Image: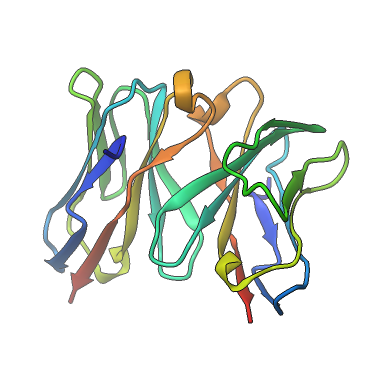
Amino acid sequence: KNEVEQSPQNLTAQEGEFITINCSYSVGISALHWLQQHPGGGIVSLFMLSSGKKKHGRLIATINIQEKHSSLHITASHPRDSAVYICAVFPGIGEYGNKLVFGAGTILRVKS
Amino acid sequence: NAGVMQNPRHLVRRRGQEARLRCSPMKGHSHVYWYRQLPEEGLKFMVYLQKENIIDESGMPKERFSAEFPKEGPSILRIQQVVRGDSAAYFCASSPPNRGLTEAFFGQGTRLTVV
């Protein structure tokens, strides 16, 4: 069983659509990161959440600590949003203490 | 304030050679983490270092791999006698002291190809 589960694994959308990527985790966490990786590219940290909701441009990230669930939303999607989106949790204590635990990623393709 | 700098971006080595990957953390960051991304796989933790100390190397292969973060200069991930299976993207992240990975900034990665 993976400690961090993302869904969907693959997502194809039309330009302009509203997109939601989900992340569920089974460990207690200090923080949760949403990361973006373009093909052959580096990793960009989009958000770090420990509670509530954050917004940056067309991107919105929410987290529900009690339900151990986070979502990443993209409004008015654009082909340049095509990338792999990775959820990563930082437990801070316990078995995974000082490590980030990664989801498998969601491959997003936005068609024009 | 430059971000996390990794070099080289791309590295090609023949089997049996040594690979040295460098990571310069963000200014003021004293914690460095190395991750490996094998083709078609997710990111996996390798090692966590603070200045002059290896804190957790539980993700490092037992042989041929080593890492250091000296008092001065970048962190180095060293792979001796590379094999084809070492071909991967290696990412470094850094964080400030006393924040753990509640703040983490990633480099662009080094893509190692072993031929």
Side of A103 relative to B25 (left or right): left
Identify which residue, A11 or B20, lies in the foreground: B20
Is residue A95 in view? Answer: yes
Is residue B29 in view? Answer: no
For the point 27% across and 27% down, which residue is it?
A26
Side of A54 relative to B85 (left or right): left
Quarter of the image containing the N terminus of chain B? top right
Residue B13, horizontal then vertical, whole percent = 71, 76
For the point 17% across and 62% down, which residue is it?
A11
Quarter of the image containing the C terminus of chain B? bottom right
- Name above or below for residue B41 compared with residue A34: below
For the point 70% across and 76% down, which residue is it?
B15
Residue A104, horizontal then vertical, whole percent = 32, 51
Residue A51, horizontal then vertical, whole percent = 31, 22
Residue A32, horizontal then vertical, whole percent = 37, 32
Side of A24 relative to B83 (left or right): left
Identify which residue, A48 or A86, lies in the foreground: A86
Asked which quadrant contains residue B27, the reply is top right
Side of B100 relative to A101 (left or right): right
